[in-house]
Image (spheres, rainbow, N blue to C red):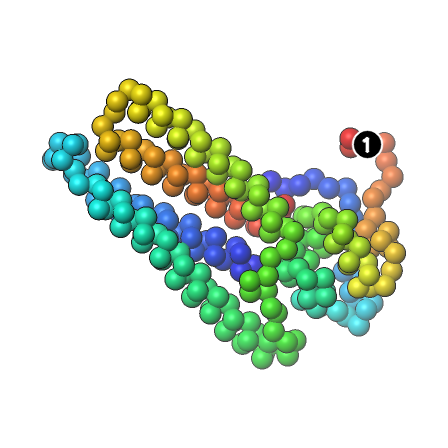
Amino acid sequence: MVKPTRVTNSIRTLRFTNAEMTQAELADKVGVTRQTVIAIEQGRYSPSLEMAFQIARVFGVPLDEVFQYPHGPEVII
Amino acid sequence: MTFEEKTTWVAAVVMAAVSAVYFWVVISQLGEVPVTEIAYQPALVIAVVATVVLAIVGAILTAIGSAIGAAISAEITGNGPVDDIGRTDERDTAIDRRSGLIGYYVSSVGVVIVLGMTMLEFDYFWIANVLYASLLLGTLAASSVKLVAYRRGF
């Protein structure tokens, strides 16, 4: 059931640099459960594009500062 | 643990417990009474109604417990309450959709078996009980998939 994803994120760092925002606070701002924030942070869940934009907007940064997709030969079609 | 996950646990445990009692009551009569004389109908109705009522009561108690737990946690940590109760997001919806599909497949296999039994003119006792077991297994499979998805990632 674990969804393989190559998407990484900097949410933990961004929370820390944004007045040590808690996972619960971020969840409240985005309107999701805290468990979903935890799952995204740990790379166990890839959010929808809409939620990804909402998270980036909370931190006031562009999307690719929150989520990264590494360059590499593996192309998943 | 999300509220959704807690209520899934409650519903799964209630369903497993009630059906275990039902099958124990009915199957214990199998060797003693002819199948056509086993009064499974009242027990089956009671089992279905009890499952629904207990699952609802369990969900209400879970909500109350979660609210009290959140308030105590907020008091201790000073971080304010986390209002996860009743909140569902896209991950919950995706998990629900996936688990529902698995449950549907499991139930469908049972329903096909029941269809065959009906055509072969099995006794109503077997048809009703295999049908109940199919729906039960489908629901339990859906709950299991949902709980694994919540625990191990989705």
The answer to whether any part of residue B37 appears in the image is yes
Q: Is residue B154 left or right of residue B51?
A: right
Which residue sits at x=46%, y=40%?
B141
Left or right: where A5 falls relative to B142: right
User: From the viewer's perspective, is residue B66 above or below residue B48?
Assistant: below
Q: Quadrant of residue A55?
A: bottom right
Local SS, label 1 = loop
Going 31% across and 54% down the picture, which residue do you hit?
A: B50
When the figure is inspected, residue B10 is found, relative to residue B33, above or below; the finding is: below
Residue B126 against residue A20 in the figure, above or below: above
Q: Quadrant of residue B117?
A: top left
**For residue B36, which quarter of the picture?**
top left
Residue B114 image offset from top left, x and y in percent: 34, 28
Residue farthest to the top, as pictured = B120
| Chain that bears disc 1 | A
Please give the name of the residue rendered at 82% of the width and 61% of the height, measured from the top-left corner: A57
Tell whether B36 sits left or right of B17. Answer: left
Left or right of B102: which side holds A11?
right
- Name the residue rendered at 26%, 22% in the picture: B121
Does residue A11 appear in this view?
A: no
Quarter of the figure that contains the C terminus of chain B = top right
Kindly identify which residue carries mark 1. Answer: A75
* Residue neighbourhood size for the residue with mark 1, other residues' Cα within 10 Å, grouped as few (<14), some (14–19), many (≥20): few
Task: Estimate the x, y position of residue B153 in percent, counting from the top left.
Answer: 62, 47
Q: Position of residue B44 (x, y in %)?
A: 27, 44
